[in-house]
Amino acid sequence: MLGMLAKLLKALNSEASPAQVSFGFVAGMIVGLTPAWSLHNALLVLLVFAFRVNLSAFFLSGLVFSGIAYLVDPLMDRLGEAMLSASGLNALWTTMYNSDIWRLAHFNNTLTLGSLASALVLAVPFFFLSKFLVVKYRAHVLAWVRKTKIMRLLKASRFYRLYAAFSSGGQA
Amino acid sequence: MKWVRPGGIVGIAAVAAVLGLFWWLLADWLVKTSIEQVGTRVVGARVEVGDVDLTFSPFGFRLDQLYVADPERPMENLVQCASVIGQLQFWKLLMGQVIVEDLAASGVKFSTPRTTSGEIEKIAKPGETTGEDKGGFDFAGLQGKLPSVDDILAREPLTTTQKATDLKELSQARRVAIEQGVDALPDESRIDEYEARIKDLTSGKIDSLESLKKRTDELTELKNAIRKDKHAVEQLRDAVREAKATLSEAFSELKEAPGRDLARIKERYGLDQVGAANVARLLFGDTAKVWLEKLQTWYDSIKGFLPRGDEEPEPVKPKRGEGRFIHFATDKPLPDFLVQRAHLDMELPVGDVGATLTDITHQPHILGRPLTLQATGEKLAKAQSLRIEGVFDHVDPNQSQDRMDWSLEGWQISDAALSQSESLTLVMERALVDLSGSMGVMGSRLSGNVDGGFKSVDWSSPTKEGWTGQLVKTLATVNEFNVAGKLGGDILSPDMTISSNLDEIIKRVAISELSAQQKELEKKLRTHLDAEVEKVAGPYQDQVAALTKSEGNLDERIAQLEELLKAELKSAVDSQKKEVEEKLKDKLKGLGF
């Protein structure tokens, strides 16, 4: 956990693109909020590994949003139930139900659909929000933090040594 | 390439390789273990698989040496298969549906012996049938081994004995009650005393009004005492009459009891049924029962997987974090488990038979089609042909209908033991049989029939003596006969009737042989029961005579008391008046009137 946090800080403080970090956060959010063993998560994990999305942001975000999902999954379950029961969408669901690939995606599971819909709705604002925060962090917080006494103290700590070790290593 | 992470792609490939290795090394073992564990739990006896091989192209499995032990007979296999090859739909499996497109089982054998017991922890099945023969008639009743009088009396609670005991107890109770009543009655001396006092009161001179009043009071008091005694005597007389009536009724019941006992014993021990003995059931009942039990076992096995109408689907609350699957209309509805087509090559005692089953599923209501069965065998080792057709329709679980029709032609029977009792060993050495029948189950109601035509029958039996010897001789002349069976009742406790034109032939032998024995037994029983009645009849007659005598005495005493109650002072007063009148007349004469 400490290592992962250090890696994240390293990514935040590095020259890595804010979009890469934000994509990691968004992908982690989707995986964390929706049931782990589902087709879309498998595809998402493949994409995250295959492309240069920040893995530390992905794992940390996934961990945090798994905890949040545990709290809100009754709400997401109800949302999925309402969507699947909506008479206006019945034709769409019936068409999808008759397709093997959609059945494989478990779209007709109340929790899968409810959580995925919630995650997708949040994905775009969350991407821009996290990107904005990364940029702001680098412009203001990082410069300020580096000047604080506490940072100077931290530089002498084990955490900083870890951070420095990752900083000198390859990019995640 | 700026956006691509080569290391990540290598990692994904590595994970895929590990999964492939896992499949290659462990999947066969995992599937074999799962089949054995789940199968053992479902069947209730050991399920063993020799080898499992999973294949990718076509996607499926092959099981070798599958053994399913019989939970009822652990040293037998319910079924064994040399190999089972199945092809599955890969995508459906990923969606959680086991859809077997084609299943082929070869070397299928039933009821084969096992070298090790297939028993697991025994669980009693509810509603297990005892297989009781409702016909209630066996060779013991026909073979001349009728029960003895002593056996019957030892086993049977006799109404005669009970009624005799009742009469004795009743008699004793009434006697005690009447004796107590007699002790409380006025005796002869008291009646004499009453007479003397009445005489005193109603005679003698009454010299004043005070004297008259005193006598009147005393007489009233005396009459009250007499009335009280009379009432007690009347009560006792009524009790005697009631005792006589009760005892008489009990005695009448006692006299009727032997007749009732005899009728019941005759019915229970089949003494009345010899004429209607169902010989076909005796000869073929055991065999039919074994077949019926096998049929029930197989039906139970199939039915266990089919939905029942009385099963209300329980609303299952989804677990936290799992959600609920909602199903929509589809033109290709598929259940969670389905074998679309299964072909079995069976090695039966009658010969090799091929069977095809379609649409095997525990959710026929989703599929919308019933399970069908077709089995055919031509030019079999021991028959000309076998045909079985069945439909197990549970598409609507509330209106389930199962039906099976079969025919077996030219079945060559050899050395079929029909009876192996001490008194009769009967073997059908050879016969050519044509069998046809059907069986249907609607809900839990069973219906069915079997018709069998036996030709070229040869019998053999070492039994030469007695009526069974006569029966064997008679059967030796019969080389062609028919047997018909009917099934009905509940599937868990079916009723079975078997009839044959053999019945008439054999009945004649049975009746002539047994009628003499039965008559002797009936006579002995009657003698015994009559003796039971006689034991209590003598004392009863004496008591009734005594009661009649007591009743007469009591009537006499009541009459005496009634007579005493008639006494009045009027006579004494009249006598006194007359005396006064006489004196007055004398005085008037003296005065010259």
Image (cartoon, coloured by chain):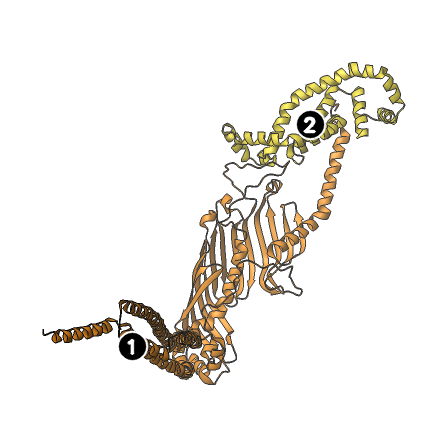
> Which residue in the structure is indicated by mark 2?
A29
Which residue sits at x=51%, y=82%?
Answer: B462
Residue B573 is left or right of residue B313, and the answer is left
Give the letter of the orange chain.
B
**Mark pair 1, 2: CA separation:** 131 Å
Are callouts 1 and 2 both on one chain?
A: no
Secondary structure type for disc 2: helix
* Residue B263: image location, x then y, percent: 39, 75
Which quarter of the figure has residue B450? bottom left
Residue extending furthest toward the left: B593
Image colour assigned to chain A: yellow
Q: Which residue is mark 1?
A: B199
**Image spot of residue A108 (x, y percent):** 57, 34
Q: Out of A35 and B147, give the one closest to the viewer.
A: B147
B513 vs A164, nearest the viewer: B513
Is residue A13 visible from the viewing direction of this image? yes
Q: Quadrant of residue B503?
A: bottom left
Number of other residues with Cα within 10 Å of mark 1, as a class: few under 14, some 14 to 19, many 20 or more: some
Asked if residue B159 can be seen in this view, the reply is: no
Answer left or right for B105 relative to B309.
right
Q: Quadrant of the C terminus of chain B?
A: bottom left
Q: Using residue B261 as the reference point, say whether residue B417 is left or right of it.
A: right
Query: Residue B401: x, y in percent?
Result: 45, 52
Provide the chain ID for the residue under circle 2. Answer: A
CB within 8 Å, label 1 to label 2: no
In the image, which is nearer the foreground, mark 1 or mark 2?
Answer: 1
Q: Is residue A26 above or below residue B497?
A: above
Element carrying mark 1: helix
- Quadrant housing the N terminus of chain B: top right
Residue ranking furthest to the bottom: B465
